[in-house]
Amino acid sequence: MEEKKLPLIVVGVDGSEDGLRAVRFGAGTSLAFGTELLLVHAVDDAMLAGAWGVVYDPEVLQNAGATANEQAKEVALEMGVPEDRLRTEVVLGSPGGVLGRLSEVADLIVVGRRSVSGLERMFVGSTSVSVVANAACPVVVISAASTPKPVGGLGLVGVGLNTSPGKHETLEEAFKYAKRQNARLEIVHALQPPIGIFGPKMSPDELEEQLEFTRGGIEAVAKSMAEKYPEVAYEVVVVADSPINELVSRSARYDMLVLGTSDSGIPGFGLGGLLRGLMAHASCPLLIID
């Protein structure tokens, strides 16, 4: 009889504190769900080709990757991940490309978000952006600075929701995650009021009417989804504010903020300013669904 294949969690390892935070999250998730855990360090072939006029010794880079993987493996073993469910690999290729390819066989990718400040936050990390943009499975983006403690202590999961019609995968993933964490779910939609001198004017009464109309539509969708997950207590929040301001300010209260990348999905955020801004500034991990 053929042995059933376990789900697979892949963690990007780079030797940084953010990379180790990703390892801890991946190891904890692997323990909770009995999955295999693959720790991967990518050796960027652009460096091997002599980027910036410097030629790097492939053996040195391979050894550095092996060292980073060994450190990550020790962390996972200390957390209790069984050695027979734990693998490490050093792979040639850009980190974003390697993790993107692995996402085709993985059930979850976990990457660290480099801890940056000021203007650096505008650019986030090229690896995390590349993985999120191209992954074929859900991606968790986590930072050692914004999330130093184990995830799950706050008992609240957030999901950013827009009103586009279409598939409901991201909203359902938020319900699933809240159920697994035995947490409440907060479904947030921020209605950006018209701005600029050429924007359409909206009276306070018209704005309130628009908010109520939007809230009714979202509550109908949430009620339908909640029938599949009766264990999850949820609340719908509809406010007049910019989405980035609202979700960043709320993120400190969340164990996880769930977002989508598809413009036609629910919630459905394109990998543009909003999602990049949340990747840079959110005070909790992000679970991003394509």
Image (tube, helix red, strand yellow):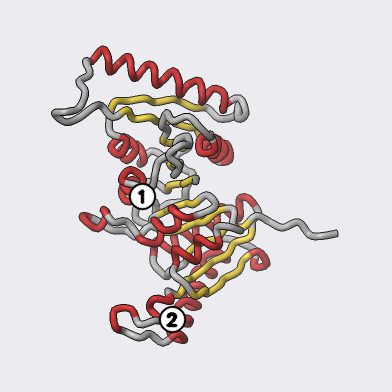
Location of residue 159 by image quarter: top left
Q: Position of residue 23 (x, y in %)?
A: 49, 61
Residue annotated with mark 1: 279
Q: Residue furthest top?
A: 205
Q: Amino acid at mark 1?
A: Met
Residue annotated with mark 2: 61
Question: Vertical placement of 158 versus 12: above or below?
Answer: above
Question: Vertical placement of 205 versus 156: above or below?
Answer: above
Look at 50% across and 60% down and name the residue there. Answer: 100
Residue 84 versus residue 43: which sits nearer the camera?
Answer: 43
Location of residue 61 by image quarter: bottom left
Mark 2, residues whose alpha carbon is within 10 Å: few (<14), some, or many (≥20)?
some
Look at 43% across and 63% down and name the residue there. Answer: 19
Look at 37% across and 25% down and name the residue there. Answer: 238
Q: Is residue 283 visible?
A: no
> How many numbered dots are placed on residues in this image?
2
At mark 1, the secondary structure is helix
- Give the quadrant of the N terminus: bottom right
Q: Residue furthest right?
A: 1
Residue 166 versus residue 214: which sits nearer the camera?
Answer: 166
Report the Cα–Cα distance between label 1 and label 2: 28 Å
